[in-house]
Amino acid sequence: MEYTLNFEYSDDGLVFIDKAYLTEWNDDLLYEMDILLDPHGKTELICDFPNEDWVTVVRPRETKQIREFCNQGKMVVWLLDCAFEKCEIEECKEIADSYKWLYLPTGKLLVASASELVQCLAYPELEMEEEKFFELSLESGWYAIQNEGITKIMYCKKKPPESTLSNIKNVIEK
């Protein structure tokens, strides 16, 4: 399946999340996601942390909860610094080396831009319909996620390893 992805902001992210987890978001997670989406401290958020280094101190410290949320298998985020147009999503029978794992308790996979997801969760009166890229209905359970940049993403239903998950990834493509 091929999809067109349009990101409104240059520093954004692509999010994979089961719709059931949207109810777990609170103001703290929304704030941390805003910080996560600002890798270089270019937004007004930097004013909240005067005299602190954004990259080495603030961002790692202030994104702890959102990283834990992701690394529990609740969300996968690819951090982007440019816009992409085409993305191919493909189901595979087997993925050998996956570093991203997603648990879908309901099987309702939502794929959206991170900035738009934050906006819609912060302002519940906004409709999510236009902000999402697409939804997939899959069998509930764990999925291995592998990608080649952001242009090709593969998924496979599979049991995750016992090791720690790492579900936030910087992706830079020109």
Image (spheres, rainbow, N blue to C red):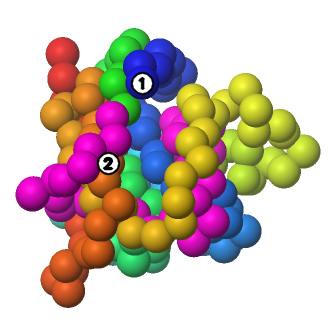
Please give the residue where the numbered disc 1 appears in the rendered image.
1
Reply yes or no: does residue 112 show up in magenta: yes
Q: Residue at x 26, y 29 (%)?
A: 152
Q: Residue at x 90, y 45 (%)?
A: 125
Task: Name the residue type under label 2.
Answer: Tyr
User: Local crowd at mark 1 within 10 Å, few (<14), some, or many (≥20)?
Assistant: few
Q: Is residue 145 above or below residue 170?
A: below
In-image side of 101 versus 12 (left or right): left
The answer to whether residue 29 shows anywhere in this view is no
Reply yes or no: does residue 136 show up in magenta: no
| Labels 2 and 1: the sequence-earlier one | 1
Task: Name the residue type under label 1.
Answer: Met
Q: Position of residue 38 (x, y in %)?
A: 39, 44
Q: At numbered mark 1, what does the secondary structure look like: helix, strand or loop?
A: loop
Mark number for residue 155?
2
Q: Position of residue 138 (x, y in %)?
A: 53, 52
Q: Residue at x 28, y 59 (%)?
A: 144
Q: Is residue 93 above or below residue 82?
A: below
Q: Position of residue 51 (x, y in %)?
A: 32, 62
Write down the region rendered in magenta.
Answer: 90-117
